[in-house]
Image: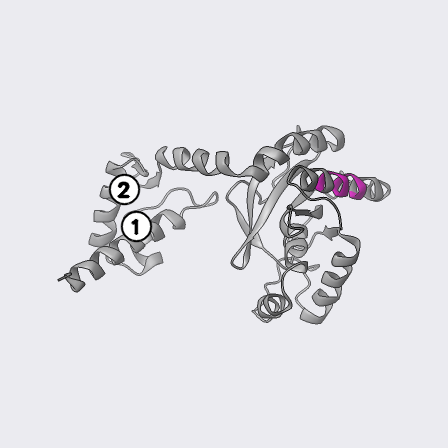
Amino acid sequence: MTDKPENDYLLSSVKNALRILNSFSQETHEKRVSDLAVELGVGKSTISRLLSTLASEGYVIKDPNNQKYRLGLRILTLNSIVTSQLEINREARPILKELVRDTGEAAHIAVLEDEDVVYIEQIECLHPVRILSYVGRRNPIHCTSSGKVLLAFQETSKIERLLATDLVRYTMKTIIDPSILKTQLAEIRESEVCYSECEFLEDVVSFAAPIRNYSKKVIASISLVGPKHRIKQNQLPALKNKVIKAAKEISKNLGYSGH
C-alpha cells in the first residue's frame, strides 16, 4: 500500500520548491532564506533545505558574498525549450522585428493565463524606456492594451468573473469601473484594436490587436508600446493601422483565413 503521509510530504515539498522559484521576479531577483520563509509562510529550515536541493540541480545559485539566492542557468534551458515549441513565437518574431524597425517602438506578444497577461515574446527598440514588460512578465488585464484585447474575446462568464474582482488603480487614468470596462471591451470586439494611455504606467501608451489561429479563436495579442512623450497624437492612426496589419499577418501565418 502507498504510504499516504510520505506522499503528502513529498507533494508539499514539490509545491514549496515551485513556490520558491515562482517568487523571484525581475524586480526582486535575489532573496535570503529569511525573506522566503516570511513571504511563503514556511519554516526557515524547510526553505534552506529546498534551496540546497534546487541549487544542487542548478535551478538557483547562492551568492557567497551576501548569502542571497537567485535563479540559476538551468531555468534558461527550460525557457529555451518552451519558447522553441511555441509556434506563435516562430511565426510572430519576424513580423515583430519589422514592426519595431518601422515604428521605432517595442513590440510584444502576450497570452492570457489565469487572471494575468503573460508576455511570451518581445522585441526591444533602439531607445527603450522603463516599461514593465518582458518575456515571462505577468501584468494586469484591466489596464493594459494586451489585457483588454485578450479579455474582450473571452466568454461572457469569464469576463464577468474577472471584472468582479477587486480591480487595482495604478494611475489616475486606470479604469476600475466594470460597466465602463464592459463598454470598452465591446468597442474592442467591434474595432479589433485597443489603445491604452497611461493606465498602467505613467507616460506609457500602447496599441494592441488580437491574434487568431486556424479555428478563428483569439489566442494572443500583439502590442506596440512606447513613451507618451515620444508618440505624438498625429502618429496614433498610423500606428494603430500598423499593429492591426501585423496582427492579421501573424494570424494568417497561423492558419486564420478571415471572418
Q: Which residues are magenta?
A: 240-247
- Quarter of the image where the N terminus is located: bottom left
204 to the left or right of 29: right
Residue closest to the eye, 253 or 190? 253
What residue do we see at 49% from left, 34% from top?
84
Q: Earlier in the sequence, mark 2 or mark 1?
A: 1
Overall secondary structure of the magenta stretch? helix
Q: Amino acid at mark 1?
A: Ala
Give the colour scheme shown. one colour
Picture disc at residue 219:
none
Q: Is residue 195 magenta?
A: no
Question: How would you rate the neighbour count of disc 2 (Cα within 10 Å): few for under 14, some for 14-19, many for 20 or more?
Answer: many
> Is residue 184 positioned above or below 60 on the image?
below
Judging by the rendered image, the residue that carries numbered circle 2 is: 54
Residue closest to the eye, 91 or 151? 91
Q: Amino acid at mark 2?
A: Leu
SS class, disc 1: helix
50 to the left or right of 198: left
Q: Residue furthest right?
A: 234
Judging by the rendered image, the residue that carries numbered circle 1 is: 17
Question: How would you rate the neighbour count of disc 1 (Cα within 10 Å): few for under 14, some for 14-19, many for 20 or more?
Answer: some
x and y percentages locating residue 74 in the rendered image: 35, 34
What residue do we see at 49% from left, 37% from top?
85
Q: Is residue 201 visible?
A: no
Mark 2–mark 1 Cα distance, whole angstroms, equals 8 Å
Q: Are marks 2 and 1 in contact (CB under 8 Å)?
A: yes
x and y percentages locating residue 231 in the rendered image: 77, 40
